[in-house]
Image: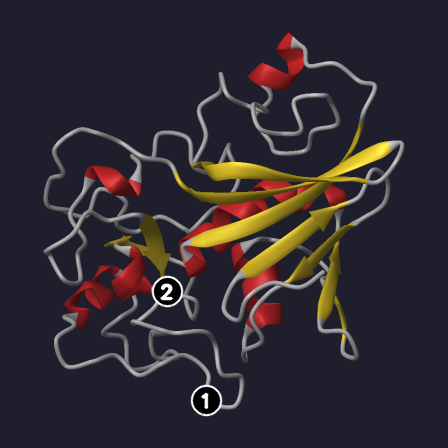
Amino acid sequence: MQTAPGVALVWLPRDGQVIAKIPARKGNRRWLHESVRIRSPHLDKDSGKWTLPRNCLTKLVTAAIDRYGYIVVCRDMSRLSKRTRTCLEAAGSDCDCSCLGAYHGADSFGWFERVGDVMVADLGEVKRTAILYSAKANNTDPVIYDGQLSGLDYRADRAGRHGWPLAIQFMCACCMSARARVWDHCHAHGFVRAPLCNTCNTRHWRGWQPQHGRATPSSNLDTSYYAWCPWHNDTEVEPCSA
């Protein structure tokens, strides 16, 4: 299970737990535990792969898009099963039918959507698909963010995001020159901060360098959106995360 540097990838086998390969950096366990809300994420240090509960897949995809902009999801699916209304109306991304996952949840409100074509590998009784997901698009004119989610805990699950607007409905709160794509949050305190475009969210990174961590913000980025974290100016707590 390999992918390009800086790209998150998860694999959903027909049975068993989710296997994830995410860009190595300090704080991954904390992110999985507190942002994705996985109680006990397990890392195989030799392979760099995480073993995670099967029911976390939708939360993981949503949170990974907010963190990296994109995620590749690989799934093993039966060649014999057929697509049904249950598939179309599903809220998650766990699918085992002949649609190869391309249409799973197509009739439901979600936070991400398929980007590009579906890659398929024939493995005999099963087919393995690889689908690139990104934040859901919106054609309305973007508006300036005015703290609509101020003070809310960051959540990646469907119930926790009930009533949230899509980030793409706003201009990026950092550069103010592009549509936002994802919801940024303070990893130190867990609060939603602001909608950002992928470029500002990833600080123009060209793949993660584990020895250096996240790239330093360039001088043309306005980080005043950090103040949307309610604890940003509290000197008695841990400083807000970048």
Q: Is residue 87 above or below residue 222?
A: above
The residue most toward the top is: 85
Q: Residue at the right extreme?
A: 125
Comparing 64 with 127, the one in front is 127
Q: Position of residue 92 (x, y in %)?
A: 60, 31
Quarter of the figure with residue 170: top left
Secondary structure under badge 1?
Answer: loop
Rendering coords of residue 30 (x, y %): 57, 69
Q: Where is residue 114? Give x, y as percent.
A: 48, 36
Which disc, if any, is residue 186?
A: 2
Label 2: element kind: loop
User: Relative to 81, does residue 126 appear above or below in the rendering?
Assistant: below
Q: Nearer the viewer, residue 166 or 140?
A: 140
* In front: label 1 or label 2: 1
Quadrant containing the N terminus in the rendered view: bottom right
Q: CA distance from mark 1 to mark 2?
A: 20 Å
